[in-house]
Structure formats: C-alpha cells, structure tokens
C-alpha cells in the first residue's frame, strides 16, 4: 500500500476566445541582413550568366 497519493489537477478552463497573436516587427539588424542577402543573390545570378568556362589544367605540349 502506497504511503502517499498524487491528486490529478485538471487544466484551467478557458474563458472566452483565444487572443490573437500580434505580428512583431522584424528587427533592424534582420532587415539589413536581408538586404545584403538580396544583393548577393542578384550579384551571383548576374555573374553566373556572364561566366566563361575555363579548364583548370592546361594540356601539356
């Protein structure tokens, strides 16, 4: 026979609708990083179009 028992605690009853979650404004640092990423993506896509394929090793004569 156990020496003690645990009571089952029921969850609290919700009263009314769930409050809507506010969308927080993104931080300034995150916005700056997004701008850097966008600029880099544009630059790399532009560079890939202009690249001329070259062989890494030269044929021996």
Image (spheres, helix red, strand yellow):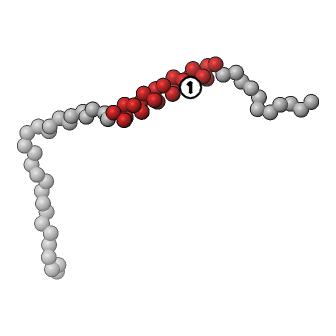
In the figure, 1 relative to 18: above or below? below
Residue sitting nearer the eye, 17 or 36: 36
In the image, 48: left or right of 21?
Answer: right
Image point (37%, 34%), residue name:
30
Image point (11%, 52%), residue name:
12
- Residue furthest toward the left? 15
- Residue 53 rendering spot, x and y as whole percentages: 71, 24
- Residue 45 rendering spot, x and y as whole percentages: 56, 23
Q: Where, quadrant-wise, is the C terminus in this rendering?
A: top right
Residue sitting nearer the eye, 21 or 36: 36
Mark 1, other Cα within 10 Å: few <14 / some 14–19 / many ≥20: few
Image point (45%, 29%), residue name:
36
Examine the image and state in which quarter residue 46 appears.
top right
- Residue 33 rendering spot, x and y as whole percentages: 42, 33
Residue sitting nearer the eye, 13 or 50: 50
Q: How many marks?
A: 1
Q: Where, quadrant-wise, is the N terminus in this rendering?
A: bottom left
- Residue 27 rendering spot, x and y as whole percentages: 32, 35
Q: Secondary structure at mark 1?
A: helix
Image point (37%, 31%), residue name:
31
For label 1, the residue is 44
Examine the image and state in which quarter residue 34 appears.
top left
- Residue furthest toward the right? 61
């Amino acid at each position: 026979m156990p020496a003690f028992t645990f009571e089952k605690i029921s969850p609290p009853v919700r009263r009314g609708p769930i409050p809507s979650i506010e969308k927080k404004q993104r931080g300034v640092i995150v916005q700056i990083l997004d701008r850097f990423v966008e600029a880099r993506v544009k630059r790399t896509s532009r560079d890939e179009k202009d690249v001329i394929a070259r062989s890494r090793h030269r044929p021996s004569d």
